[in-house]
Image (tube, rainbow, N blue to C red):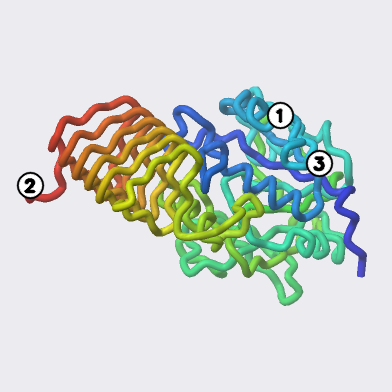
């Protein structure tokens, strides 16, 4: 049995180049990993977890709005890490994105994270599994009730990966790819350059066919893909309440009200909601399991449930917003009712009572 490497010899790579189309209109103004989540950019939670495992060299593989990351995080010293940035000039896929950062890697063991997943796995135990089997690649797997929407990964009795099956209507296992990998550096160096490469469809199947050692580590803790509005809202609430692990959340609770926010004493804030800086919530308003960005205004008697309210947006008096996304600077007049996946683009203005999902007035 091999001993786990000292974490000083482990690099962490976070792939954050996606455009976040499933989260539009929120991602029109910011990359998905930079969206406020439980009071800080989502990426902060991931970097904080990496740092808590003792790993200090973190590489961000960027593309869309690449400049935003370095402007906010700088050299990473505020989070106790050394951050480096590598930009993709063209879309390279997951495998190509990993290969693109090879020039700045330092160690022989590389942890690769998808920048929109939050995983509660013990990272040190994950590295230990990788070293125990002297693996070429170790995949973090997670069990889900319905694996049809995910890449499924069957394994043998010892946890060795036997196949990598992309989204199958008849999955052979409930184990899915959780979006965290440990690579031997030589494997990264073998990924082709100059073109898009998918690790799921090309690299992993190719390694299995070549007889490489590809093993798994099962995560029995928290896992969520933050790619859809519903998952984003629920994930932020899980972080606020301490259900999802993050050293960046200091005091978990039923609500998080950031500095400068104003909440009327008769308002009801619950369900892990976040109220952003300089936002306001009026008398008798309800905010339940929602994310309210900075400088947004929830007026008297409004109801916001399981929704995102963008920066500077206004929710009028008595308006009901459920399971919806309201873009930055949008204004909903009084008595509007939006439900069931509605999305309002930035700067849009809806007059009083302009849209209703029910007949009552």
Mark drawn on residue 326: none
C-alpha gap between disc 2 and disc 3: 57 Å
Q: In the drawing, does residue 1 fall left or right of residue 196?
A: right
Q: Nearer the viewer, residue 293 or 111?
A: 293
Label 2 vs 3, first from the N-terminus: 3
Q: Nearer the viewer, mark 2 or mark 3?
A: 2
Q: Secondary structure at mark 1?
A: loop
SS state under label 3:
strand
Task: Let me know if residue 192 appears in the view.
Answer: no
Classify residue 2 by image quadrant. Answer: bottom right
Residue 246 vertical position relative to residue 283 in the rendered view, above or below: below
State the quadrant of the N terminus: bottom right
N-terminal of the pair, mark 1 or mark 3, is: 3
Q: Which residue is mark 3?
A: 57
Position of 190 with respect to 279 (left or right) is right
Q: Residue furthest right?
A: 2
**Is 124 on the left or on the right of 113, as rendered?**
right
Q: How many marks?
A: 3
Task: Tell me the residue at 49%/54% (across/down).
Answer: 235
């Amino acid at each position: 049995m091999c001993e786990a490497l000292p974490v000083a010899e482990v690099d962490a790579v976070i792939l954050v180049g996606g455009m976040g189309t499933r989260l539009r209109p929120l991602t029109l103004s910011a990359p998905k990993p930079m969206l406020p989540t439980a009071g800080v950019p989502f990426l902060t939670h991931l970097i904080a977890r990496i740092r808590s495992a003792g790993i200090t060299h973190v590489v961000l593989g960027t593309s869309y709005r690449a400049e935003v990351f370095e402007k906010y995080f700088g050299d990473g010293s505020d989070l106790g890490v050394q951050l480096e940035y590598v930009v993709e000039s063209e879309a390279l896929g997951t495998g190509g994105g990993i290969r693109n950062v090879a020039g700045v890697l330092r160690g022989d063991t590389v942890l690769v994270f998808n920048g929109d997943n939050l995983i509660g796995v013990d990272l040190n135990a994950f590295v230990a599994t990788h070293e125990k089997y002297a693996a070429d690649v170790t995949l973090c797997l997670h069990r889900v009730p319905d694996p049809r929407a995910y890449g499924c990964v069957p394994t043998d009795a010892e946890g060795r990966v036997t196949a990598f099956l992309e989204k199958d209507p008849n999955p052979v296992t409930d184990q899915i790819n959780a979006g965290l990998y440990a690579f031997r550096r030589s494997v990264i160096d073998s990924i082709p350059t100059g073109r898009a490469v998918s690790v799921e469809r090309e690299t992993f199947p190719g390694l299995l066919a070549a007889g490489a050692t590809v093993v798994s580590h099962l995560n029995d803790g928290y896992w969520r893909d933050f790619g859809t509005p519903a998952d984003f809202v629920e994930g932020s609430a899980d972080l606020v309440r301490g259900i999802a692990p993050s050293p960046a959340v200091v005091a978990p609770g039923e609500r998080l009200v950031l500095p400068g926010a104003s909440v009327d004493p008769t308002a009801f804030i619950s369900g892990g909601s976040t109220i952003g800086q300089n936002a306001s919530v009026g008398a008798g308003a309800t905010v339940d399991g929602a994310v309210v960005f900075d400088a947004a205004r929830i007026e008297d008697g409004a109801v916001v449930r399981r929704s995102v309210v963008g920066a500077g947006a206004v929710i009028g008096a008595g308006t009901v917003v459920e399971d919806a996304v309201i873009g930055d600077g949008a204004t909903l007049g009084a008595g509007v009712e939006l439900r069931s996946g509605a999305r309002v683009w930035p700067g849009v203005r809806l007059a009083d009572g302009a849209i209703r999902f029910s007949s009552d007035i």
